[in-house]
């Protein structure tokens, strides 16, 4: 039996494609004292990986020849550590491979209330925590607020949208296709959607946000951020969280003009989800009742097999994912 791994073959200048990755087979890893051998069940694919490949991410760079990194839900298949037994499900950085070896501090047991287990990487995992931190803890979105969310049906966006609806906000989503727009209206409860490719964004934002935007959960940066910053309500909160519009480009879009931000007395706050890791249990406890009552769910864009990870990642970076991008491995 071999360990199958995906390594970076070459660094893309613009959009990644599957040829930038290679599948390699290595010997099965062996564990030493106190270590644990895991079999990957689910691999999370996330936009920050594009920044790692570009050498621009705070968590470090990935160079040609390196194993692609990523968070996984993995199953313990052999253990030399008293705290972990065969069959335990853990959340860890198992990376883009079928098997991984870990020291115990690198593992967290998956909370048994999390069902399906893939939710530990999506709705009740890092993207959900990002959405909750930004919308609830930083923006303090409240009933009556008008909230605008780009990438509205994606992992972070769809969670933020549903949380905003549950708090009584008016929620406007920006999406990349009519199909995603229909999903946002029908399944996620958005009040209005704007197609970023075919609609006049300026006119539609004015139409759907007549009293200005109270909360903008920015997942894309680019010209959308600049435009939204001219339409802020008094005391608006702008959560700067992601740069989907720029990740595939070596260039960066210049930022918004300060005048309208000053006029709105707005707060712009950068969000790094790692800062909220100590509050993960609090976030899960708050979200479980919303899931039970049907107010919160996650569509998962599930690819199958380690060999499908490169194409699934490229689809994510082209904006073609329908919900949280995950690869089912085992
Ligand atoms: N700061 C943090 O700690 C933190 C943590 C997690 C995630 N993030 C950021 O949050 C954002 C969303 O992440 P996610 O995992 O939830 O991804 P996602 O929304 O599931 O997928 C990305 C989506 O971005 C949209 N998009 C907008 N402009 C795009 C463009 N020019 N090219 C390609 N796609 C574009 C696409 O949706 P449409 O086609 O519908 O527009 C695409 O489906 C990313 O920027 C990510 O880096 C930040």
Image (cartoon, helix red, strand yellow):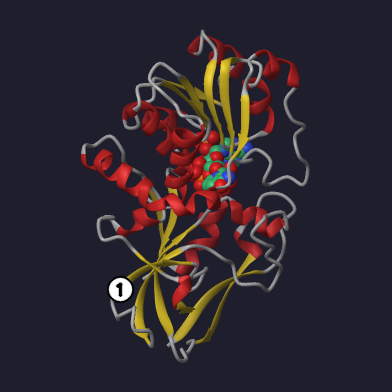
- In the rendered structure, the answer to whether residue 109 lies left or right of residue 263 reads left
Q: Does the image show residue 327? A: yes
Q: Nearer the viewer, residue 264 or 5?
A: 264
Specify the quadrant that holds the N terminus.
Answer: bottom left
Q: Quadrant of residue 83?
A: bottom left
Q: Which residue is mark 1?
A: 88
Q: Quadrant of residue 187?
A: top left
- In the rendered structure, the answer to whether residue 178 lies left or right of residue 240 reads left
Point 58% across, 47% down: residue: 272
Measured from the top left, where is residue 163 in percent x and y? Answer: 37, 33
Measured from the top left, where is residue 174 in percent x and y? Answer: 51, 27
Specify the quadrant that holds the C terminus.
Answer: bottom left
Measured from the top left, where is residue 132 in percent x and y? Answer: 43, 40
Point 48% across, 23% down: residue: 147
Q: Nearer the viewer, residue 78 or 98?
A: 78
Determine whether the residue tagged by mark 1 lies in a helix, strand or loop: loop
- In the rendered structure, the answer to whether residue 34 lies left or right of residue 243 reads left
């Amino acid at each position: 039996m071999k360990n199958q791994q995906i390594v970076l073959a070459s660094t893309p200048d613009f959009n990644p494609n599957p040829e930038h990755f290679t599948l390699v087979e290595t010997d099965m890893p062996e564990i030493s004292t106190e270590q644990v051998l895991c079999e990957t069940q689910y691999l999370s694919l996330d936009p920050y990986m594009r920044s790692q490949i570009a050498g621009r991410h705070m968590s470090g760079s990935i160079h040609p020849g390196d194993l692609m990194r990523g968070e996984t839900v993995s199953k313990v298949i052999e253990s030399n550590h008293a705290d972990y037994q065969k069959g335990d499900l853990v959340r860890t950085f198992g990376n883009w491979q079928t098997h991984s070896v870990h020291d115990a501090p690198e593992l967290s047991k998956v909370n048994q209330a999390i069902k399906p287990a893939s939710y530990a990487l999506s709705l009740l995992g890092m993207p959900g925590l990002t959405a909750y931190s930004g919308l609830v803890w930083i923006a303090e979105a409240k009933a009556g607020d008008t909230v605008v969310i780009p990438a509205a049906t994606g992992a972070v966006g769809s969670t933020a949208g549903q949380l905003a609806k549950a708090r009584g906000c008016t929620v406007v989503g920006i999406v990349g296709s009519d199909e995603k727009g229909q999903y946002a209206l029908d399944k996620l409860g958005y009040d209005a959607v704007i197609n970023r490719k075919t609609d006049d964004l300026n006119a539609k934002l004015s139409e759907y946000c007549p009293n200005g935007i109270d909360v903008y959960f920015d997942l894309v940066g680019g010209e959308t951020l600049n435009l939204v910053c001219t339409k802020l309500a008094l005391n608006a909160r702008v959560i700067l969280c992601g740069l989907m519009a720029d990740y595939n480009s070596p260039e960066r879009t210049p930022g918004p003009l300060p005048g309208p931000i000053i006029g709105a007395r707005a707060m712009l706050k950068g969000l790094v989800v790692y800062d909220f890791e100590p509050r993960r249990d609090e976030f899960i406890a708050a979200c479980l009742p919303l899931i039970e009552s049907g107010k919160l769910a996650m569509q998962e864009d599930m690819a199958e097999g380690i060999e499908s990870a490169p194409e699934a990642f490229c689809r994510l970076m082209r904006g073609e994912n329908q919900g949280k991008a995950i690869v089912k491995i085992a």
